[in-house]
Image (spheres, rainbow, N blue to C red):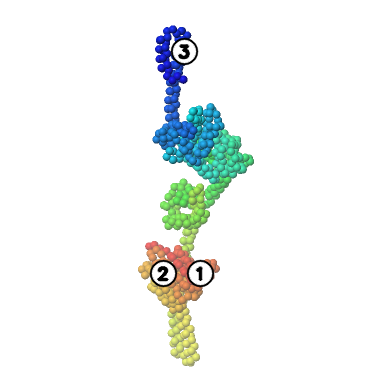
Amino acid sequence: MISNPEDLQSNLSKLIENADAFSSELLEELRFLRQALQRLANIEHDLRKQTTFLQQLIDLIPMGIAVHINGIIAMVNPTGVSLLQAQSEDELIGQKAIELVHPDFRQKALERIQRLLQDVPASDFPIVPFVEEKFLTINGDAFDAEVAGIVMSPTEEGTPILVLFRDITQQKQQRQALEASEARFRQLVSLMPDGVIIHKNRRIIFANDAAVQMLQVECAEDLIGREISEFLLPNERCLVEKRIRELLDSWEALPISKNHIIRPDGSIFLAEIRAFPFKDQEERAILVVIQDITERERMLAELEKSEAKFRLLAELLPASVFIIAENGELLYMNQSSKTVLGYSVEETMSLDFANIIDRETLSVGEKYFLALEIGETTRYELKVLSKWGDWRWLDVWITKTVLDDRLVGLGVALDVTWRKEMEQALKEHAQHLVTALEEERRRIASELHDEVGQQLIGMKFALENAQRHAKTPQTQRAIQDARQQLGALTEQVRELSLSFRPPMLDDLGLLPTLLWYFKRYTERTGIQVHFNQYGLNGLDIPQAHTLTAYRVIQEALTNIAKHANTDEVSVEFKVTRTRMKITIRDNGVGFDPNEVFQHYRSSGLQGMKERVTILSGKFDIQSAPQQGATISVSIPLPSK
């Protein structure tokens, strides 16, 4: 090989100048030699240029490149220097290449190098495929690497091996995270109650357990690879294909659709379909969620039939049928409601019920409804202002239920104004009867006291006069016996007069009469009365209420004396401007109130209750055998 073509050319030129005797053949040979020397110079120039380009290319490749001969590093490009955390190439040249491999991977790395050098001729330039290893930096830090090797032409020093490597730590972490995410996705999808199918290019590549059960096949493998068109009715396939194209073109989920699905056994069910596009390994795929709605559609059809029957029945009923939300919003009202209150359905739906319903009855109705559990029914009365301007009474039956995922009240309201008016008339009539009865009692008591009493006193004086003029002892004894019988009769008439109507009730009022009655009651029965009162002195109580209070207390104490077997009783009487309350307690033998009222064994208790009810009051008895008894009376007082 010519080491310096320029010097050789210079020497030849001198030789030519001094050799004039050379022949023309020699001159021609020299010309060819000059041409050969020029070609060699051009080749060497190209080699230098290519070598420089190759070196620049290696330096610019974003992958670690190293060459080791006999296991000793001979070259490392800048990217490799950076990956191995060295300051320069000099820190790495001369080191053993195997020491930069993690101990867990060194044995396998050595085995690959031996196979690379021994099994394949060097002229073939074999390349070891990329494998994953762990490398160590010169600082001892480990990182995941992807490595490949190329055997180069042998030299005097040995056979060089060019190593390509890159850091895949982040890539591996991302892959592991992706695998974990995919595992979670598969687990989640497997647990979903709806069927999930993924298809790519119209072929199924995944099916969860719910889809397997829904399609009634043995396992997911029975579905993998099958065309989705196999599971569609022929007349629905074109529509589904159109939806698939729209989905892939827009790359957005489409609205829910309904399709009939054919199972492999030929049976058909109606499904609700949701489809979502996504990429699987850079390829377009579609995730399909399938829900069997056969039973739901059947139930909806039944519900529609039931609703139609309900509406027909509701429109035919001669009563107001309504559906109201928990917040008071009216959701439905039948046409018959117009005959009840005069408002049309349209007017009723826009009414503010707070303006036409009596507040007191409205609050009672709301309280009852809110206390209901789902499926329970209650009854209450509402006082409502009709379109005609009068107040109507409605008897309301309402059930709490769920309709279209809303908590509602389903109710029926009957116009019972006539009944209320009749009840009021009956109360007034009963009050008239009670008043007439009390007047008759007062008249009888007055006649017993004034007329019969005066006659008895006259007879007493007559007998006394006859006794003074009697001649014989026998006659005097007979007259004395008659006087004693007359005294007993006079006392009975007096007691009967007081029991019918004590005169002091009209003359002195309720409180003095009660005090007199309690004293007389204790003297006659031996039962001590503990009396507490509030308001009896300062308030004017209507006569009907005064008589009812007296009769209730009188009857209660009479029953206690007859049946309670006790030696004391307490009476509490409280009067306010709006109500009077009476509570009578004893600690006697007690009784079963339900049994007493059911068998009408006590006309006295029934009479007390009726008197209180006539005045729109409440009468309650709490008692049980050996538990004593408590009578509670609450009567509203008329406003002045």
Q: CA distance from mark 3 to mark 2?
A: 150 Å
Q: Residue 227 versus residue 61: which sits nearer the camera?
A: 61
Q: Residue 84 versus residue 513: which sits nearer the camera?
A: 84
Q: CA distance from mark 3 to mark 1?
A: 144 Å
Q: Nearer the viewer, mark 1 or mark 2?
A: 1
Mark 2 belongs to which amino acid? Phe
Residue at the image point whose x is 55% and y is 37% from the top: 199
Q: Residues within 10 Å of mark 1 (few under 14, many from 20)?
A: some
Q: Residue 556 versus residue 262: which sits nearer the camera?
A: 262
Question: Considering only order in the chain, which callout, 1 or 3, is on the residue closer to the N terminus?
Answer: 3
Residue at the image point whose x is 51% and y is 47% from the top: 404
Q: Nearer the viewer, mark 3 or mark 1?
A: 3
Mark 3 belongs to which amino acid? Phe
Q: SS for tag 2?
A: strand
Q: Write down the residue under mark 1.
A: 624
Q: Residues within 10 Å of mark 3 (few under 14, many from 20)?
A: few
Q: Write down the residue under mark 3.
A: 32
Residue 406 visible in the current orientation: yes
Q: Write down the residue under mark 2.
A: 573
